[in-house]
Image (cartoon, rainbow, N blue to C red):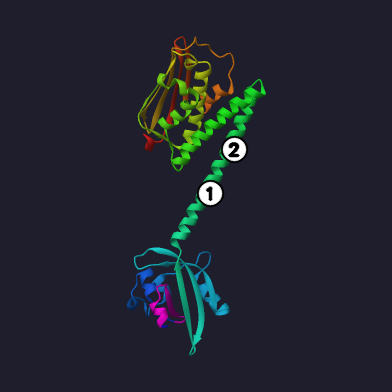
């Protein structure tokens, strides 16, 4: 018993029919009760044990039939904090008395970590399913709007790479969001590395949430691709202005986004609506999108609601 009393591991002895008889240093450290405070108290009154999925009374009955018990128990410390412990309990007879030797190990942090891991895995599974669904839809739509296998590969690989770049930004932020400037630069650098001096980006710092950053990234990819192939950036004199601001609107805020091309070849209104056009106009839920094919250059404006916390 001397070794038990000196042990830093929480170990205590209680009378099955009475109160606590031994309370060692480890128990004092874990629970906060001094020896004088604990001895004589019933375990139920001192620690308020809760057995997940069962009851403390069922635990006692199990000890009578099986002598030993091991499992998770929730105990209350002196400060009122509920901690999760792994408890090993043994019932022994000593001079006709039913004594219980109990050792506990604090697993509160481990259980919290396990719960966090479960939440992360559930979230990852959810995001993977959504991403795969999006990729499948993107593949079908791209195939439907291309005339050759080579054209399909070029368009689909570009959109897939754009999706991957947006996801990298989100992963780097631990999926908290994507800074809009970084998102824009990641799209423009790929398509317009030789025209960076003709691109003006102007806007206040703004972090988009994941559910908005991913489709917004795909829209930016389509705008940059079209500008490079057919629009202002296909000409050595063409320019692009990318500007945004946030304004309050009742109980929410609105992101006003502008893509303005100038100095490029003559603008032609598309003869048919492809997947890229549909993605730009319908890719953001709740957004108002306007595309204007002006003689001076293509202009796209997007007004999309934001959560108040992002304003």
Q: Write down the quadrant of residue 306 in the picture.
A: top left
Q: Is residue 240 above or below residue 58?
A: above
Q: Is residue 179 above or below residue 288?
A: below
Left or right of 156, for residue 211 = left
First along the sequence among labels 2 and 1: 1
The residue shown at (43%, 31%) is 305
Q: Nearer the viewer, residue 238 or 107?
A: 238
Q: Which region is colored magenta?
A: 2-17
Q: Residue furthest front?
A: 194
Residue 136 drawn in magenta: no
Quadrant containing the N terminus in the rendered view: bottom left
Residue 13 drawn in magenta: yes
Q: Measuring from the top left, give residue 230's x and y in whole percent.
A: 53, 15
Residue 19 can be seen in this image: no
Q: How many marks?
A: 2
Q: Measuring from the top left, give residue 211's x and y in whole percent.
A: 48, 36
Q: Secondary structure at mark 2?
A: helix
Residue identifier under label 2: 132
Q: Nearer the viewer, residue 216 or 305?
A: 216
Mark 2 vs mark 1, CA separation in Å: 16 Å
């Amino acid at each position: 018993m001397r070794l038990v009393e000196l042990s830093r591991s929480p170990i205590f002895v209680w009378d099955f029919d009475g109160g606590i008889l031994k309370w060692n240093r480890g128990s004092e450290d874990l629970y906060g009760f001094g020896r004088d405070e604990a001895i004589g108290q019933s375990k139920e009154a001192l620690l308020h044990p809760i057995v997940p999925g069962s009851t403390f009374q069922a635990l006692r009955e199990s000890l009578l039939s099986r002598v030993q018990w091991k499992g998770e128990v929730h105990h209350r410390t002196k400060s009122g904090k509920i901690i999760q412990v792994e408890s090993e309990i043994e019932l022994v007879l000593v001079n006709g008395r039913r004594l219980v030797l109990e050792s506990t190990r604090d697993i509160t942090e481990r259980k919290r970590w396990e719960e966090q891991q479960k939440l992360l895995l559930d979230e990852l599974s959810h995001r993977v399913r959504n991403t795969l669904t999006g990729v499948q839809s993107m593949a079908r739509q791209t195939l439907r709007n291309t005339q050759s296998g080579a054209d399909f590969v070029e368009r689909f690989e570009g959109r897939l790479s754009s999706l991957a770049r947006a996801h990298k930004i989100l992963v780097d932020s631990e999926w908290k969001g994507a800074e809009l400037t970084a998102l824009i630069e990641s799209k423009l650098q790929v398509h317009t590395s030789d025209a960076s001096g003709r691109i003006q980006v102007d806007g206040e710092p703004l972090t988009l949430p994941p559910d908005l950053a991913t489709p917004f990234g795909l829209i930016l990819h389509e705008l940059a691709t079209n500008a490079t192939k057919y629009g202002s950036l296909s000409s050595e004199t063409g320019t692009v202005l990318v500007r945004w601001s946030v304004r309050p609107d009742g109980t929410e805020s609105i992101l006003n986004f502008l893509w303005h091309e100038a100095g490029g070849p003559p603008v032609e209104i598309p003869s048919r609506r492809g997947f890229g056009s549909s993605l730009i106009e319908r890719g953001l839920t709740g957004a108002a999108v306007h595309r204007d094919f002006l003689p001076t250059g293509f202009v796209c404006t997007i007004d999309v609601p934001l959560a108040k916390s992002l304003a």
